Amino acid sequence: MAPAAAFFDLDKTIIAKSSTLAFSKPFQAGGLISRRAMLRSTYAQFVYLVGGADHDQMEKLRQFMSQLVAGWDVATVREIVADTLHNVVDPIVYDEAVGLIAEHSLAGRDVIIVSASGSEVVEPIGDLLGADHVIASRLEVVDGHYTGEIDYYAYAEEKARAIRDLAERNGYDLAQCYGYSDSVTDVPMLEAVGFPHAVNPDKELRRHAAAAGWPVLVFDKPVALRTRVPLPPAGPTLAALAVGGAVAVGGVLWASARRRRVG
């Protein structure tokens, strides 16, 4: 039999918040963003959680974030993400998603996270969850700093194209693969696999799932990830930056994927 895989969207599918808006307090504490930018991203988080983000909202958010990070030092960003990741992510991972990931792994399927958020954040989350591959967005980097330009945007139809490319490289039989997402913008990704699932779907995806006969799953139990997955110790300096939890912008960061990752 050809190998199979399970493709998971990240935001509101695996984690209860938007990873694109997950690190504003650590980045503000680290001097990368202003309080005004953090408040603006907090509002964006509210809109996203209440009604979901449609295509126009996502485009505005993408433009805002790509401009926001222009000039940021990549090494500083990576250090802050590494040292605050467990504080930010630990409280917001769905227990149901962690269980599904474990089930697919035990069944011999690769687990792939597919997210429009940036690889700087998505890849470490993927590592924590034991994902085999990550498909994520990337920002252009010149001389160790983000330019504000986007190298690769893993969104909507591009997710489906990236899945098909990965399946061709790894020999996956897409008809035997699984897909999970909360957003109608991921319909192309879900249609690319044989077993699509709507997770905490927005209104448009719920209607599409009902018409197509797709299962609808409800994830509502955030779990302390350290009780399910061993986490690295917090860094002695930057871990304190995440005290109080995070609400807003950091997954905007994109950089080159590592050798085993897909962009």
Image: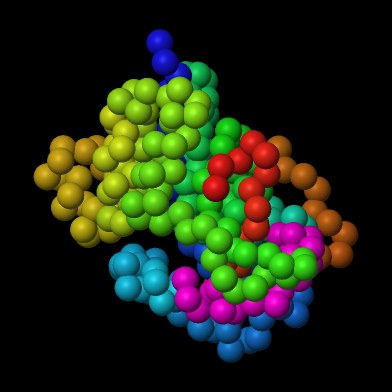
Residue 89: give x, y in percent of width and height.
61, 54
Q: Kindly tell me whether residue 263 is visible in this rendering.
A: yes
Residue 164: give x, y in percent of width and height.
39, 36
Furthest residue in direction left, as rendered: 211
Q: Nearer the viewer, residue 78 or 29?
A: 78
Q: Quadrant of residue 234?
A: bottom right
Residue 36: give x, y in percent of width and height.
58, 89
Considering only vertical position in the picture, is 180 above or below 71? above
- Asked which colour scheme the image uses, the reply is rainbow
Residue at 71 percent of width and 74 percent of height: 72
Residue at 56 percent of width and 42 percent of height: 262
Q: Nearer the viewer, residue 61 or 152?
A: 152
Residue at 37 percent of width and 23 percent of height: 173
Q: Nearer the viewer, residue 118 or 169?
A: 169
Residue at 60 percent of width and 74 percent of height: 148
**120 in magenta:** no
Residue 184: give x, y in percent of width and height.
28, 55
Q: Quadrant of residue 171?
A: top left
Considering only vertical position in the picture, is 255 above or below 146? above
Q: Quadrant of the N terminus?
A: top left
Residues drawn in magenta? 62-81
Horizontal side of 226 relative to 4 (left or right) equals right
**70 in magenta:** yes
Considering only vertical position in the picture, is 123 above or below 152? above
Q: How many marks?
A: 0
